[in-house]
Image (cartoon, rainbow, N blue to C red):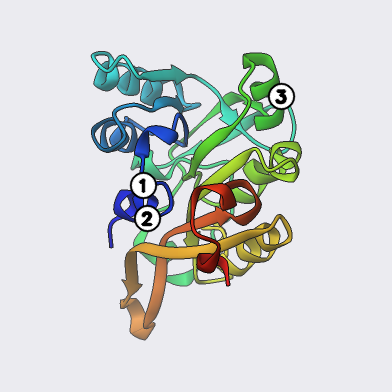
Amino acid sequence: MDLVADIKKIFPDLSQINTVFDVGANIGQTALYFSQKLPDANILSFEPVKETFHELQNNTSRLKQVNCFNHAFGDKDESKRIFMRKDSQIHSMIDNVTSPSDAISGMYDIVGEEIVNIKKIDSFCYEQNIDTIDLLKIDTEGYEMQVLQGASSYLGDNRVKLIYSEVGWDKDNKALTFFPDIYLYLSKQKFKLYGLYGLRHNYKDGSFGLFCCNALFVNSNAIKAHIEPKWWS
């Protein structure tokens, strides 16, 4: 039910959460939350869209532990078009939405485009001399797998401890990354699913079921030293 309460079960001393990546920061909602719940953490917030980025800067300007960066993350260092929607929270690199209920609602109608800079997490961390990501939050509207693939070296070297990602439960909705895809990918990287948060259900057009939520994954190799061995049995 409570993300930080669960993180505290793994890290009783929350000061061990030193570096938080807020990927897909939007206007700073998550950065504000983490700054309150994890006051000792250095929070790096990433938002590629210029107008939204300026709002992010304004909303976090008084928070010394929040640093803002105007670029996206993906599986390669490049420039790419991002598609703008009416709600800035669902701007995305994905342009095709095939979920019938979403198409009917007009929720994902494209209202503009912008070319944004994309970096790999691996490249960024090497440039910034970041040794470990304690908590990697990803909310990139269907682009989560590309973000993770751009962190393949850090994942493989057990330099990411926790991943908190938005996931979807409809394989036909390209605006949300299908949960099994992330689950299988991270399982190969020795991550275990810990919990699901903020569950949203779909009741439109006679379609019932889980629509989306956020999932917390724990790197079993990276954090064994912090908890009792029986937790992993």
For marks 2 and 3, give the one nearer the viewer: 2
Sooner in the amino-acid sequence: mark 2 or mark 3: 2
Q: Quadrant of the C terminus?
A: bottom right
**Tag 1: Cα neighbours inside 10 Å, few (<14), some, or many (≥20)?**
few
**Tag 3: Cα neighbours inside 10 Å, few (<14), some, or many (≥20)?**
some
Q: Secondary structure at mark 2?
A: helix
Q: CA distance from mark 2 to mark 1?
A: 6 Å
In the picture of the structure, the residue carrying the numbered disc 2 is 9
Q: Which mark is residue 70?
A: none
Q: CA distance from mark 3 to mark 1?
A: 31 Å
The image shows residue 161 at horizontal and vertical percentages of 56, 44
In the picture of the structure, the residue carrying the numbered disc 1 is 12
Residue 155's quadrant in the figure? top right
Q: Nearer the viewer, residue 115 or 231?
A: 231
In the picture of the structure, the residue carrying the numbered disc 3 is 123
Identify which residue is drawn at 47% across, 44% down.
110
> Disc 2, disc 1: CB below 8 Å?
yes
Sooner in the amino-acid sequence: mark 3 or mark 1: 1
Q: CA distance from mark 2 to mark 3?
A: 31 Å
The image shows residue 80 at horizontal and vertical percentages of 66, 30
Q: Is residue 143 visible?
A: no
Q: Nearer the viewer, residue 203 or 20?
A: 20
Residue type beneath disc 2: Lys
Q: Secondary structure at mark 3?
A: helix
Q: Is residue 26 visible?
A: yes
Residue 95 drawn above or below residue 54 = below
Residue type beneath disc 1: Pro
